Amino acid sequence: MRRLRAGGHLARAAALAAIVVAGILVVALFGRDRTIDAASAAQRVASAVERSLGTRPRVTCPEGVEAQRGERFTCTADSAGQRLRVRVELVDGDGAFRIVGFDAAPRGRGAAG
């Protein structure tokens, strides 16, 4: 397992993550009410962050996010003792999304929309 240190390593990891996941991640994210499936989104976000950081984080994403193009939400990833806010944007109404960035989150805060 690789541990991240605050500062340069986190910034480089965030930049790398943005590059790695610049391609669209398509996943069946919808429930009956045209909101994303938070658990499915969390799994995909965890996979993308793992490719960048080398460790698989525990990720939570908010419930009730409308499945429409341009909708943004923030997931929380816990990895190697650090908490990260992962910003996600839906690129269409069919569940394709991209990670637009992430940064360190204060401890004690959960996922936000």
Image (tube, rainbow, N blue to C red):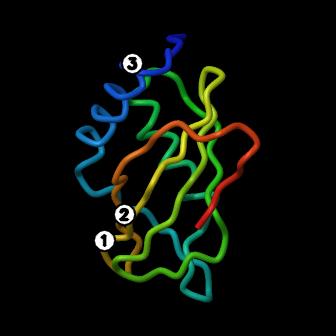
Which residue is at a point 36% across and 63% down the rendered structure image?
Answer: 97
What crowding class fits label 2: few (fewer than 14 Cα within 10 Å), some (14-19), or many (20 or more)?
Answer: many
Q: Which residue is mark 3?
A: 9
The quadrant holding residue 58 is top right
Tag nearer the camera, 1 or 3? 3
Front one among 30 and 7 = 7
Report the Cα–Cα distance between label 1 and label 2: 5 Å
Query: Which element type, helix, strand or loop, lies under badge 1?
Result: loop
Which residue is at a point 23% across and 40% down the rendered structure image?
Answer: 19
Which residue is at a point 46% across and 31% down the rendered structure image?
Answer: 50
Q: Residue 16 placed where, x, y %?
A: 28, 32
**Figure label count:** 3
Tag nearer the camera, 3 or 2? 3
Report the Cα–Cα distance between label 3 and label 2: 25 Å
> Upstream in the sequence, badge 3 or badge 2?
3
The amino acid marked with disc number 3 is His
Q: Residue 26 placed where, x, y %?
A: 35, 61
Report the Cα–Cα distance between label 1 and label 3: 29 Å
The amino acid marked with disc number 1 is Val
Q: Which residue is mark 2?
A: 97
Q: Are marks 1 and 2 in contact (CB under 8 Å)?
A: yes
What crowding class fits label 3: few (fewer than 14 Cα within 10 Å), some (14-19), or many (20 or more)?
Answer: few
Q: Residue 7 placed where, x, y %?
A: 42, 21
Q: Residue 86 placed where, x, y %?
A: 48, 48
The amino acid marked with disc number 2 is Phe
Give the left or right position of residue 70, taking residue 74 as reference: left
Q: Which residue is mark 1?
A: 91
Front one among 9 and 48 = 9
Which residue is at a point 34% across and 57% down the rendered structure image?
Answer: 98
Asked if 87 appears above or below 73 in the picture, the reply is: above
What crowding class fits label 1: few (fewer than 14 Cα within 10 Å), some (14-19), or many (20 or more)?
Answer: some
Query: Which element type, helix, strand or loop, lies under badge 3?
Result: helix
